[in-house]
Image (cartoon, helix red, strand yellow):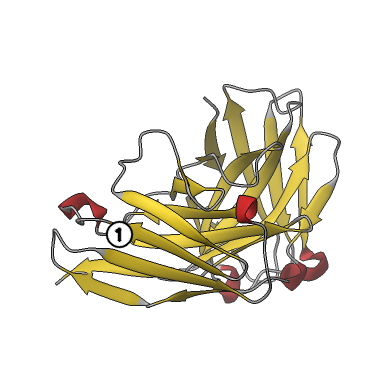
Amino acid sequence: EVVLTQSPGTLSLSPGERATLSCRASQSISRSHLAWYQQKPGQAPRLLIYGTFNRAAGIPDRFSGSGSGTDFTLTINKVEPEDFAVYHCQQYSSSQYSFGQGTKLDIK
Amino acid sequence: QVQLQESGPGLVEPSQTLSLTCTVSGASISSAYYWSWVRQHPGKGLEWIGFIYSSGTAYYNPSLGSRVVISFDTSKNQFSLNLDSVTAADTAVYYCAVVPTINRWFDAWGQGALVTVSS
C-alpha cells in the first residue's frame, strides 16, 4: 500500500502570496498516476491537476504541479480569495488508490 | 459529462449493513470506467473504498477487509456499495466517483451522502 503524506497540515497565507503544498509517497509512483483535488466546505472534491502537472479543464494557470518519484508539489501563484480550501493528493498503483490526509489553505 | 448521485439511508444501526446506490447519467454503466466509492470521515481526509469495472471485477481497500462489496445494476444504470458490520467508525460522507479507464484520477464525483452509524 502506498501511503501519501501531505505537508503542511495547515498553510496560512494572505491573498497574493504563493502557496507550496507537498505530497510525499512512501514508495516511488508514476508521474502519470498522481493527481490533486481542491475541496471546499460542504462540497465534493474537484479535480485540479492530473498526471502530476496537467491542469484539469477550467483550472486557472496560477495552479501548477511538479515532482517525480516520491516527492510531488502543488503550487498556487498569487493565491486568490476563492483558493482557500483543502487540497488532497491522490495516487494509483497496482489497482489501488490512496489519498493524502489533506492540506488546509486558510487566510492569514 | 458523467453525473453521479448517491442515495440511501442516512442512519444505520451498529452491526448492520450500510447500503448506498449511485445513479449514473451521461454514460452507460457498461462503459470503460472504474465506478468507485470514496469516503470522508468528519473533518478528515479522503479514503478510497474500492471500485468495480464494467467486467464486474472489483478491487477494494485492504483496510476494509471482507466487509465491503461493490456491485452494479446495468438495467438501472446504477452501482452500489454494501459495507457490513458497521460501527461508529464508519460514520462518514460517502462519495461515488468515476475514473475513465484510460486515466488514473477521479474525473467526476457525486455530491456525497452523510451516513451516521448510531443506535
Q: Amino acid at mark 1?
A: Ala
Question: In the depicted view, which residue is nearer to us: B84 or A37?
Answer: A37
Residue B101 found in image quarter: top right
Any part of residue A101 in sight? no
Q: Report the side of A74 relative to B87 (left or right).
A: left
Q: Position of residue A1 (x, y in %)?
A: 73, 71
Any part of residue B54 in sight? yes
Residue A14 found in image quarter: bottom left
Q: Position of residue A25 (x, y in %)?
A: 60, 72
Question: In the depicted view, which residue is nearer to us: A79 or B28?
Answer: A79
Residue at point 60%, 71% (across, down): A70
- Marks counted in the figure total 1
Residue B66 found in image quarter: bottom right
Secondary structure of residue under mark 1? loop
Q: Report the side of A68 relative to A18 (left or right).
A: right
Q: Is residue B6 above or below residue A25?
A: above
Residue at point 48%, 50% (across, down): A53
Q: Position of residue A52 (x, y in %)?
A: 53, 53
Q: Chain of mark 1?
A: A
Question: In the depicted view, which residue is nearer to us: B53 or B40?
Answer: B53
Q: Quadrant of the C terminus of chain B?
A: bottom right
Q: Is residue A6 above or below residue A42?
A: below
User: Alpha-carbon neighbours of circle 1 within 10 Å: few (<14), some, or many (≥20)?
Assistant: some
Residue at point 52%, 24% (across, down): B1
Residue at image mark 1: A85
Residue at point 35%, 62% (across, down): A86
Question: In the depicted view, which residue is nearer to us: B106 or B114?
Answer: B106
Q: Report the side of A94 relative to B10 (left or right).
A: right
